[in-house]
Image: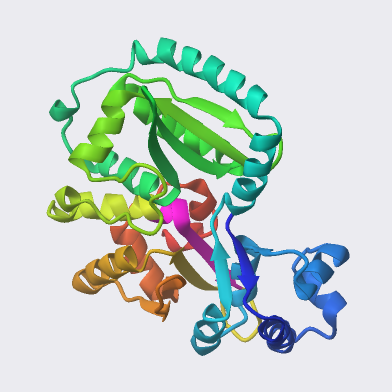
Amino acid sequence: MTRMIFKSKSSRKDFFLKLLKLSSSKNWKTLYENNKINRSVWSDYRSGRLSIPQEIYQRFLVYFNKRDIEYFSKKINVMEDNWGKIKGGKKTYFRHKILFNEGRKKGLIALSKIRKNSDFDFTQIELDRELSYFIGLLIGDGFVNKYNSSYLIQFIGHKKELEYYRDIICEYVKSKFNLNPIIKESNEGNFIRVNIYSKSLFNLLTKEFDIPPGRKSHIVLIPPKILNSEKEIIFSLLAGIYDAEGCVFIDKREKYSKPYPRIDLHMINQKILNQIKEIFDREGINCSFANISNDNSRILIYGEKNIKNFLEKIPIKNPKHLLKIKDFLK
């Protein structure tokens, strides 16, 4: 899970004081209870002992206006999903190196069996809306890499999205590529991994659509082959990105006559956000940058009219979004 860490003690203090004021809460207790946060966890957020999960941070931002969001976006660092695991994983690896190597050998043997049925002619795969959506989802939550002679395509999602990945994404992979994804649930966190082992799919994504192997969050762009396609192909890719990285918020405060929606796309890749903004501007989807910097930017879509316009063009599929905005799909 992506987490937010304030750059300084003073900015963290200012943020929470502003949050208390804007939320119109009587005290801290009312504020954390209204947000369904445990008292001790809340205390750790305020003191900086715990970083703030992105989902909770976005919930806080509902109270802020655009100017405040821009200001505090400059005061916070965004840590990628696996930053803590990388740090802890290196220590664990060196402590148990022999066991890791033995496990890796067993894993490669298992992969060699899977690979026998994972080949197809990737040059014959035609680009359509479903494939474009799949690539968009990969850009947002996916990962491709090669380990010696093994090829891995992986998605990471929340456990609540298990049915979505199983019934939509995995079924698509089976029907389109005749591959059998493997879903693994983490015992240490609330996330799942969808693993697909295939050299042909790896080549399709990296050679035909320029998806860089390894860590790609800072450098991946919309593939030229998709960017130069018809609108429906481009929109499907954006739907995949939003289903992976987008956040939907419905502000139900009394100051609004009816629930006020917002869709937020936060990424640490300024270049791809610029591409998306250009597409939205061209296609008449009203949006704005909450902040423009090299490592902390977001695209925001505010209000019922703009949300409906977005949904009419961008065919998102993830139930975690659809349930929140069902009233705006009519």
Q: What residue is rendered at 36% in x and 20% in y?
A: 179
**Relative to the observer, which residue lies in front, 168 or 39?**
39
Establish if 30 lies above or below 182: below
Q: Report the span colored magenta.
A: 242-251
Who is closer to the viewer here, 179 or 235? 179
Q: What type of secondary structure mainly makes up the magenta span?
A: strand
Is 246 inside the magenta-drawn segment?
A: yes
Residue 274 figure quarter: bottom left
Q: How many marks?
A: 0
Q: Quadrant of the C terminus?
A: bottom left
Q: Residue at x 29, y 50 (%)?
A: 237
Task: Tell me residue 252's x, y (percent).
Answer: 62, 74
Task: Give the vertical position of 225 relative to 68 (above or below).
Answer: above
Residue at 53 percent across and 86 percent down: it is 71
33 vs 322: above or below: below
Where does residue 66 sit, x and y in percent of width and height? 49, 85
- Decide whether residue 91 is among the magenta residues: no
Relative image position of residue 193 (x, y in whole percent): 54, 35
In the depicted structure, whether residue 137 falls above or below residue 297 = above
The residue nearer to you, when weighing 217 against 251, is 217
Q: Is residue 108 visible?
A: yes
Q: In the rendered image, which quarter is residue 197 located in?
A: top left
